[in-house]
Each structure stands twice: as C-alpha cells, then as structure tokens.
Image: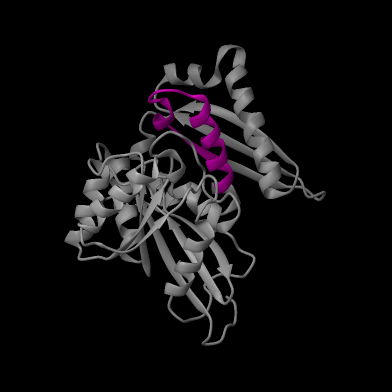
Amino acid sequence: MTDTSGETRCGFVALLGAPNAGKSTLMNSMVGAKVSIVTQKVQTTRTRILGVTALGDAQLVFVDTPGIFKPRRRLDRAMVAAAWSGAADADVVALLIDTGMRLEGDTRRIIDGLKQNEARAVCVLNKIDTVPRENLLALIEELRAEDLFTDFFMVSALKGEGVEELKQFFAGRLPKGPWHFPADQLSDMNDRLFSAEITREKLFLNLHQELPYALTVETETWEPFDNGAVKVEQVIYVERGSQKGIVLGKAGERIKSVRMLAQDDLKELLDCDVHLFLFVKVRENWADDPERYRDWGLDFST
C-alpha cells in the first residue's frame, strides 16, 4: 500500500446501470486501459471489477458492476446482488443511463431501488452522440423530478466526450485518506481471471443468441517462461454436447478464430508473447457450481 499523507484522497465510485448502458466502456475510458471486457450483448460483465486510476493526489477506484436486471436464474441473482453490494459500499454512486432508452424496465427498477435505500446518486447520461440535444434536455428534466440525483453529466464513453470532466468531479468527491493500491496498479483482477475474461469476450462477439450465456471460461494453466513469454491453457465449459460443436465451428474454424483474437489481445494487454491453447468441454451444471461463484467473487447463496 502506498504511504500517503493526510492530503491524499481515495475512494470507491460504483458504476450502476441497466445492461449495456456503457459501464465497462466508461470505466476503461476513465482508467485509460482495458480492464473490463466490452461487447454489444447485455450482461457481459458477470462480477464486480475494480478499475484503479489516479488524478493528482486522488486515487479513484471504479467499481464496474454487473448490469441490474430482472433475474431469472441463480447466476442472474448473484450478479444483481453483486451490483447492489458494490453500490452500498461505495463513496460515490453513479447511475449510467443510455440516452436512447426510455426510463422504464431495468432503469426504472434501479431508480426505485436507490430511492428505497434512501441513496443519492450522480446521473451520467451516456451515448449523448446518438440523440438530439433537445431530447437530452427533456430527459434531464424528467430525471430531476425523481429527486434522486445530486448532479448530472453528459458523456460519450465510447468517444471520450465529457469523461475527463466527470473524472475530475469524482476525484473531488472522494474522502481524504491513503491510497488503497500501488500507483501503477490498474485493476484487482489477476492475470489468470483477466485472460479468461478476454477469451469470453471473443466468444461473446463470435457467438449468437443465447449460447454466450451458457458458457464459461477457466484458465487451468499459466506457465511463464524465462524469455518473458507465457503459456496459457483455458477450458471453455458449455452446458450441452450440441453447444460444443457450435463453439468449435466447422472443421474447428470458429475456435481457431477465437483463439487468435484472444491471443492477439492478450499479447498487447500483457505486453508479452502469449501462447494460448483452448479446449472445449461439457459441464452440464457449471452455473450451479459454488466454486465458480467463489472465483468470480459472487455469493452462491443468493
């Protein structure tokens, strides 16, 4: 832990929002590096992920939470519980709202949940580059009437618009205290879990419909070499035998493509040569295995 004086600041900023509101994209933009995977599919983030960055004497610890939605199964319930837990423990709560979506469904549930907990939040309107300005002003007025938000910000997390101003605001809201992480640390996620998430991201991008939600990725071997390279062996678990064939693709072409995409990403992100090997296995009840939940930092009992 960094030795700091009483003049430093440090705290947690929880990023809440409906699935696909842009939480992971915003955190990556704030941190200045890819620490959370991003796809256009909802519910990509499965666990609470911390992204760490500094601004002057302040260390900001962003909590990228799973999207809050109406859960249907045990994993869904654990993900939603993790999101609410991240908000309860944070120094600042920010609710991201996709400006192209109506204030109903998942977003309405989050607003009502925050009110029930008598919380106050910062409203971050994301994807402002996709809607007319007059629509944004009308949306802000509608949100002001909720009597929940202390401040409003308009950003495009993908393009970086308004992100630096929002980061400065968060830094000013943090309590005084020592930094929780070394100055050069960007996340609390270890390399084994991070590399599995990168592979899962590529699977999400290359598979369709419900299949991405029926699989998980585990890093079984992480073997560093003297020359700085690393050998990584991962297993992709699916729920049914028919899904294994889909993941592999015709003549193994899909899994080869996923491996190359993930390997190239890992080489850049880890700044070393990576030799990635992927295997696909069937494990019917992986989503009901308590060990998986412990690895992800989720509560199996929810």
Camera-side residue of 59 and 151: 151
Q: How many marks?
A: 0
Residue 266, x across and y down, in percent: 66, 42
Does residue 110 lie above or below 170 as drawn? Answer: above
Whether residue 206 appears in magenta in the rendering, the answer is yes
Image quadrant of residue 279?
top right
Q: Would you say residue 189 is visible in this rendering?
A: no
What predominant SS class does the magenta segment belong to? helix
* Residue displayed at 64% across by 32% down: 261
Residue 134, x across and y down, in percent: 34, 45
Does residue 88 lie above or below 272 as drawn? Answer: below
Q: Would you say residue 132 is visible in this rendering?
A: yes
Does residue 115 lie above or below 276 as drawn? Answer: below
User: Could you tell whether 42 is left or right of 71 in the image?
Assistant: right
Image quadrant of residue 208?
top left
* Residue displayed at 44% across by 20% down: 243
Q: Residue furthest top?
A: 250
* Residue displayed at 46% across by 81% down: 176
* Quadrant position of the N terminus in the picture: bottom right
* Residue displayed at 23% across by 51% down: 142
User: Could you tell whether 79 is left or right of 243 in the image?
Assistant: left
Camera-side residue of 235 and 56: 56
Camera-side residue of 219 and 75: 75
- Report the span colored magenta: 194-219
Residue 270, x across and y down, in percent: 68, 49
Q: Residue furthest front?
A: 134
User: Could you tell whether 180 is left or right of 221 in the image?
Assistant: left
What coloring was used for the rendering?
one colour
